[in-house]
Amino acid sequence: MTTFLLRRSVERAFQLDEQPSGLCLNPAKPLHSNAPYISSAVDDVMYIVNQVVERSLATSQRSVVYNVFPSVTRVLDSDFIGMIQRKMRDESYPKAAVQGALPSENVIIAFLVLINDLDVGCDYVRRIVQSWVEEYHSTKSIEDETQVSSKSLGSLFPFEGDALYAVNMLKSLQQSFEAKASELTGDGIYVVFKNVVKPRLRPLLSDAFRDIDNQMDEDGHAEAEELVEDDEGSEYAANERAQHYFQRGWDALIRPIARIFTSRNNERLLKTVISYLADVLEKRIWSYYGRINDYGAIRLERDIAGLVNIVMRGSRYGLRDAFARCTQICLIMNMEEDEWTETQASTASGVDVTQDVGWILDSDERLRARAMVRDRK
């Protein structure tokens, strides 16, 4: 009966499913729904799950827990997550109708909401489970049994073995659901990256670095401090062109998605984007081999540092490590001669330079980075 009730409830919830209204990808327009942006089916299904868990535990019967909880796990894994997976695949997959174009806005939003459904679903299950587990652990430390809630696991299951069994079954339900949901969430995040973000990322970088003079002389270096205007009338220093155009493109690319995604999903997406962006930036830096002078190297290091700061704004600091190779290449290009000599001497003496200063580049890559600047003074 429990399995039938749950499956029928999941089916009915998705039949009556309502998407959040007023969502759009235009950052200039306000969102008329309240975050998190999820479909109504998530609330409906998790309400039923909470009721089933609560009533099963209220029986104080180990056999009921033994029979019901695996059924809840199976229904959540196969029916709830399965339905979201089918909708992601068949109804809302963000694929462009014409090659080279972006998917439609409505399809992208629907796909983002489905990924949010998985993330918030995990949060619901986690709270349902932890509310029982945490209370169980807290009541174990209470010596006066009259102060223990009659609805706690310790009261519902007087035998310690039964209460612990219920706790383990609750944890197993949570772990199984989170594992399935996280796997599908990861797949969905990659689809968003591949079909929505990646096609616009390379053109964004190309536009940011267009018309950059990496072989300027001293006069050109001084002139680069002057203010100029872009096509929208915004002023910026000429030597910050790459940062200015990249920030404008980055905000237009990431902000529309970030304001719909949950914070965890947004962080997952950024991690994927940053990993790819770091590889692309490194290849671009190496492409300047022999085509950059001292002043150009200074400007390139400033541009790379500026781009990294833009990307990392509001993100976890640990994600910055993805750009370590890029920043170290620029660091070596702009080292003073005595610093470079000291670095080489340390390597020649057999000292593990990697441990001393955290080098990620190997010795050959450091030599290559040093040789990038032509006509070094």
Image (cartoon, rainbow, N blue to C red):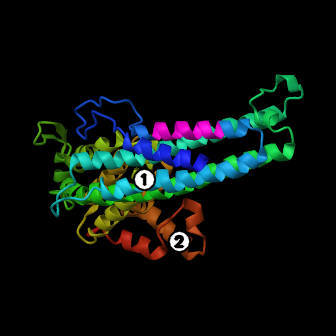
Region in magenta: 42-54
Residue 92 image point, x, y percent: 30, 53
Identify the secondary structure beneath mark 2.
helix
Q: Is residue 334 visible?
A: no
**Residue in front for this viewpoint, 214 or 116:** 116
Image position of 125 with respect to 219: above or below: above
Residue 130 image point, x, y percent: 66, 39
- Name the amino acid, label 1: Met
Q: Residue beneath label 1, please?
A: 83
Identify the secondary structure beneath mark 1.
helix
Residue 161 image point, x, y percent: 85, 47
- Name the amino acid, label 2: Ala
Identity of the residue drawn at 53% across and 55% down: 77
Identity of the residue drawn at 39% across and 56% down: 188
Q: Is residue 44 magenta?
A: yes
Image position of 325 with respect to 312: above or below: below
Question: Mark 1, residues whose alpha carbon is within 10 Å: few (<14), some, or many (≥20)?
Answer: some
Q: Which badge, 2 or 1, is on the more N-terminal residue? A: 1
Q: Quadrant of residue 19?
A: top left
Question: Mark 2, residues whose alpha carbon is within 10 Å: few (<14), some, or many (≥20)?
Answer: few
Decide if residue 250 is on the left or right side of residue 154: left
Decide if residue 183 is on the left or right side of residue 21: right
**Residue in front for this viewpoint, 221 or 45:** 45
On residue 366, the disc is none
Tell me how far mark 2 sits from mark 1, CA to CA: 62 Å
Magenta highlight: main SS: helix
Q: Residue beneath label 2, please?
A: 345
Identity of the residue drawn at 41% across and 37% down: 40
Decide if residue 187 is on the left or right side of residue 220: right
Image position of 119 with respect to 342: above or below: above
Q: Is residue 116 visible?
A: yes
